[in-house]
Amino acid sequence: MTRKRDNGEGSIFPYRNGFAAYVWVDKPDGTRDRKWVYGKTREIVHEKWIVLHGQAAKGVVPPTSTPTVAAYLAYWLKDITAPTAPLTHIAYECSTRLYIVPLIGKKKIKKLTVRDIRTWLNTHRLTCQGCAQGKDAKRPETHRSPRKRRRCCAIGQCCEQYPSQRTIQAARDALRAALTHAVAEEVVSKNVAGLVPVSKPRKRKFRPWTVHDAKAFLEYARARNDPLYAAWVLVLVLGLLRGEVLGLTWDVIDLDAAELTPERQLQRAGRQLLHRERRGRKARKRRCRSPPSASRRSSCGARNNSGPSKRPATYGKTHAGWSSRRSTEPRSSRAT
């Protein structure tokens, strides 16, 4: 006599006010567990049961339990962002700890809806962070300095320290990035955070230095024997970024040919200094060379080959010589 179902195939049976079914699945760690589905009628449960069998046959492991938003974000920060992007990990961790987990951390990640995200953003926008984070409550009740003792939220006088639009956008972006990985791992079916638009903060406008300003600054720094004079020249003349200047090593500098090839940059991630390779749009390998005369704009091969430079007029109008390994003072024969 043959069996109705094979061993491990699962079963369908009445459960409470409807029906329930389960299928044995192999988890990524090698163990086996039950995946449950529920429904009001046996036909609905049977359709879900067939879908589970199809996923198991294709090698797709359905999650046996749905994690909360806080649990999945903790996994995402530890195993995905921390090893690959340290600086991004710090920003995401701050947004997660202060703005995401306190409000929606207990929700199941599969049950998040567009309305939940919109409600979370509106609540976040109207929540005083001095009260929510207990900033004033952490101060002592009495202190000789008025600035260091409790003065607002802890004594019933709300400071109305509401988050800025940039903070709200950063929190939404962190949740959207996490849900993008959740969709790729088939934990959720869609990214609901990406369906809720947020207004972008207005960008601050800065007035770039003119050629006269840059020249006056370099002359002043040289007259005072500023030890960072060579760094100012690299920034203003060749257009190097701060991280590129701080990440320069002697093996990428050719003093005889007056050339350098910035390949790495120095970044601060929390309390650590990281000497990493340059990434992004400006990470292509390039060779920078000083101009032969002070009146000629300094060039950087890979940047000038694609057309006129987009740097403001402050870059490339002032030229100074290189500093040697033994002395940090520039060569007077090449000074502006």
Image (cartoon, rainbow, N blue to C red):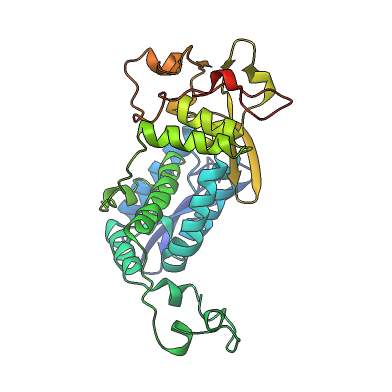
Q: Quadrant of the N terminus?
A: top right
Observer-nearest of 253 and 1: 253
Q: Is residue 304 above or below residue 205?
A: above
Task: Give the image location of residue 331, x and y in percent.
Answer: 61, 22
Q: Residue placed at 51% from the left, 38% from the top?
A: 220
Q: Is residue 332 visible?
A: yes
Task: Give the image location of residue 63, x and y in percent.
Answer: 49, 48
Residue 262 falls in which quadrant of the image?
top right
Task: Give the image location of residue 110, x and y in percent.
Answer: 40, 54
Residue 255 falls in which quadrant of the image?
top right
Number of residue marks: 0
Q: Is residue 30 visible?
A: no
Observer-nearest of 107 and 282: 282
Q: Residue placed at 35% from the left, 39% from the top?
A: 208
Task: Give the image location of residue 111, x and y in percent.
Answer: 37, 58
Observer-nearest of 34 and 146: 146
Q: Is residue 103 above or below residue 153?
A: above
